[in-house]
């Protein structure tokens, strides 16, 4: 029988108030409060890398990062995120190599049921997010559950990405649309 963590990570319905999951969220909040108060960015990023499922070389995240579990976050080499990055990682969030995120970017994997009876039962599920290599997100970009973006994707500031797109596109708007292809 699967644990609630295994069901959560697989995108299956799970109980968000499971004791193991609550304990991990408490531990992460405590650790993030400590990390976000550091003046030394190198120490901050060294400690963040230890909380992630995977972190490539040259991880650099400015202060204000928030996430739920950490073990479902997988970041490639040469990653930079500006202030106030939010990664809600009930399902895996996979970010490729050489990606840059502006301030206040949010990647959200949780999916809350539309059915009010399921919501009352505290049933939750999620869908993974996958970001390719060499992507650039402007400030206040929001990526919704289940989105996959290809390589060389640029997302304009303030955009909301509600569906998946392939390689070499510039996306803007709410919901985003392709405004140009990248050579």
Image (cartoon, rainbow, N blue to C red):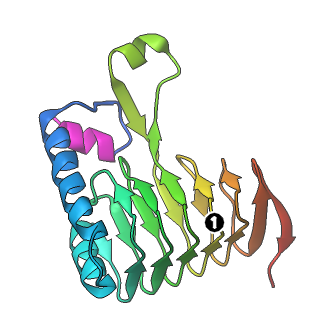
Residue tagged by mark 1? 139
Displayed quadrant of residue 34: bottom left
Q: How many marks?
A: 1
Displayed quadrant of residue 58: bottom left
Depth check, front residue: 96 or 49: 49
Which residue is located at x 32 percent, y 77 percent? Answer: 55
For mark 1, does the 10 Å Cα neighbourhood hold few (<14), some (14 to 19), or many (20 or more) residues? many
Which residue is located at x 86 percent, y 71 percent? Answer: 180
Residue 73, x across and y down, in percent: 35, 63
Displayed quadrant of residue 100: bottom right
Q: Which residues are magenta?
A: 1-9
Q: Main secondary structure of the magenta part?
A: helix
58 above or below 66? below
Residue 65, x across and y down, in percent: 38, 63
Residue 173, x across and y down, in percent: 78, 54
Which residue is located at x 37 percent, y 30 percent? Answer: 124
**Quarter the C terminus occupies:** bottom right
Depth check, front residue: 27 or 40: 40
Q: Is residue 68 left or right of residue 98?
A: left
**Quarter the N terminus occupies:** top left
Badge 1 element: loop
Outermost residue toward the right in this view: 179
Q: Judge whether residue 169 is colored magenta.
A: no
Q: Is residue 58 left or right of residue 103?
A: left
């Amino acid at each position: 029988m699967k644990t609630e963590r295994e069901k959560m990570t697989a995108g299956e319905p799970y109980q968000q108030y499971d004791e193991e999951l609550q304990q991990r969220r408490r531990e992460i909040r405590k650790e993030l409060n400590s990390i976000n108060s550091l003046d030394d960015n190198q120490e901050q990023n060294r400690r963040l890398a230890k909380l992630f499922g995977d972190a490539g070389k040259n991880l650099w995240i400015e202060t204000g990062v928030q996430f739920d579990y950490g073990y479902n976050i997988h970041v490639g080499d040469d990653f930079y995120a500006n202030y106030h990055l939010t990664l809600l990682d009930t399902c895996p969030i996979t970010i490729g190599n050489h990606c840059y995120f502006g301030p206040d970017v949010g990647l959200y994997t949780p999916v809350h049921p539309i059915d009010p009876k399921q919501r009352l039962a505290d049933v939750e599920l999620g869908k993974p997010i996958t970001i390719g290599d060499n992507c650039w997100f402007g400030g206040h970009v929001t990526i919704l559950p289940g989105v996959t973006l290809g390589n060389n994707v640029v997302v304009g500031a303030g955009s909301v990405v509600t569906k998946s797109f392939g390689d070499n596109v510039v996306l803007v708007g709410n919901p985003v649309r392709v405004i140009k292809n990248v050579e």
